[in-house]
């Protein structure tokens, strides 16, 4: 990392670290036990199923490893993960199904 | 949350038994329970941690800097973003902003933890905030929602169990990657571990039509906004998806009340 001074590197680490902690602490730290409105609670119940698919979708459809080219093996692996996870209710089974499908797909292609 | 109470199926009986077990656990047993339920995600944390150690070291960071990222930031995607941009000699402010943008979802996690852990002590909330990563968050929120009557002690203990295993192994394996890591075989498609884990974490949580609709909106909008700068599209998509889930839940409740 000769392009950056030691100070710059540690500045980046410190600011990203502090900023990330602040985002994690934000609501939990500031609100504490204060009640939240019902409509907000209702929205927040959907946080995991909203955030994670939104992050995953572009990575599935335009994978970095293929230079953004859509890849049938990766699409199939993602579909297998969701299907097995949904039916089995097990994250482990879902990961294994996704990994197996991806391996098979990459081997065949 | 919807519960099918018309016919006591075997699955419902199993869920009730699991709830009763969870409520009877001592704090120590809850820690172990959280750690045990985290183990599938070692399949992801271990190779990804090793990879970060190897990649950051190869990019020219010394051990203190690699561990500085790992311990102080403790967020894989954001760490990789910073290292990638610094390898490309991006300006300092851009490295900082991009790496922080990747972590915006943490604020949503923080908000959705409030109903469950908001009553904990200030130091406990700070410790939870530090170790609030995707895996500890999803495992814990699922557990809290499945067993709403857990005591605060049981909730914190379960979270601690997930945090020890997930954050601990992230730090340890980044260290191993930085010190002992050789090149990881290029034939292993590690890039795909991130979306696979994310999907594996939420697929079992698709319990109701509202959950399915929220996830669908998240995917469609995120793809439609694919050209926006990194991190922005998915956050807009997530907000719309949360609105969708809440809206459908409200409609369902209203229809049931009216019928």
Image: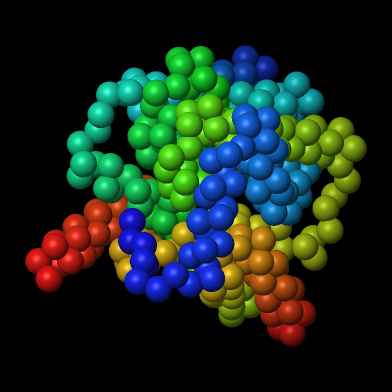
Please report the residue visible at 70 percent of the width from the left and 67 percent of the height from the top: A96
Q: How many marks?
A: 0
Q: Is residue B169 shown left or right of residue A8?
A: right
Front residue (pair A107, B168)? B168
For the C terminus of chain B, which image quadrant?
A: bottom left
Q: Residue furthest bottom?
A: A108
Front residue (pair B181, B137)? B137
How far from the left and from the top, in percent, is residue B147?
Answer: 47, 46
Front residue (pair A67, A79)? A79
How far from the left and from the top, in percent, is residue B10?
Answer: 53, 71
Q: Is residue B155 shown left or right of residue B207?
A: right
Choose top left, top right, bottom left or bottom right for residue A104.
bottom right
How far from the left and from the top, in percent, is residue A73?
Answer: 63, 77
State the colouring used for the structure image: rainbow
In the picture shown, does residue A40 fall above or below B93? below
Q: Residue furthest left?
A: B258
Please report the residue visible at 28 percent of the width from the left and 42 percent of the height from the top: A41
Front residue (pair B225, B12)? B12
How far from the left and from the top, in percent, is residue B44?
Answer: 69, 52
Q: Answer yes or no: is residue B106 visible.
A: yes
Please report the residue visible at 45 percent of the width from the left and 15 percent of the height from the top: B122
Choose top left, top right, bottom left or bottom right for residue A63.
bottom right
Q: Answer yes or no: is residue B95 visible.
A: no
Please report the residue visible at 66 percent of the width from the left and 26 percent of the height from the top: B71
For the N terminus of chain B, which image quadrant?
A: bottom left
Q: Is residue B97 shown left or right of residue B161?
A: left
Choose top left, top right, bottom left or bottom right for residue B81.
top right
In the picture shown, does residue B24 fall above or below A79? above
């Amino acid at each position: 990392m000769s392009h950056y001074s030691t100070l710059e590197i540690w500045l980046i680490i410190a600011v990203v670290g502090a900023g990330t902690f602040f985002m994690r602490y934000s609501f939990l730290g500031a609100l504490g036990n204060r009640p939240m409105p019902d409509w907000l609670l209702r929205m927040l119940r959907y946080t995991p199923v909203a955030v994670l698919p939104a992050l995953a979708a572009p990575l599935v459809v335009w994978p970095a490893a293929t230079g953004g080219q859509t890849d049938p093996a990766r699409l199939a692996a993602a579909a297998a993960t969701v299907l097995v996870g949904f039916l089995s209710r097990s994250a482990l089974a879902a990961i294994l199904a996704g990994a197996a499908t991806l391996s098979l797909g990459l081997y065949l292609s | 949350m919807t519960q099918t109470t018309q016919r006591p199926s075997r699955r419902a009986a199993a869920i009730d038994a699991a709830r009763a077990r969870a409520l009877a656990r001592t704090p120590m047993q809850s820690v172990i329970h959280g750690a045990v339920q985290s183990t599938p995600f070692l399949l992801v944390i271990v190779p990804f941690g090793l990879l970060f150690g190897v990649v950051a070291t190869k990019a020219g960071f010394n051990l203190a800097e690699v561990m500085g990222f790992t311990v102080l930031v403790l967020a894989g995607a954001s760490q990789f973003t910073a290292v990638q941009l610094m390898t490309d000699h991006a300006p300092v402010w851009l490295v900082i902003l991009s790496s922080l943008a990747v972590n915006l979802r943490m604020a949503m996690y923080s908000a959705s933890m409030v109903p469950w852990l908001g009553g904990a002590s200030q130091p406990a909330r700070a410790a939870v905030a530090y170790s609030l990563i995707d895996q500890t968050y999803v495992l814990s929120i699922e557990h809290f929602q499945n067993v709403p009557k857990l005591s605060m002690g049981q909730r914190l203990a379960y979270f601690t169990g997930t945090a020890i295993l997930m954050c601990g192994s992230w730090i340890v394996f980044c260290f191993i990657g930085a010190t002992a890591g050789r090149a990881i075989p290029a034939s292993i498609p590690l890039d795909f571990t991130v979306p696979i884990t994310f999907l594996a974490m939420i697929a079992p949580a698709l319990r109701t039509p509202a959950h399915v609709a929220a996830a669908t909106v998240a995917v469609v909008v995120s793809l439609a906004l694919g050209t926006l700068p990194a991190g922005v599209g998915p956050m807009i998509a997530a907000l719309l998806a949360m609105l969708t889930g809440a809206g459908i839940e409200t409609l369902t409740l209203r229809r049931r009340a009216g019928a």
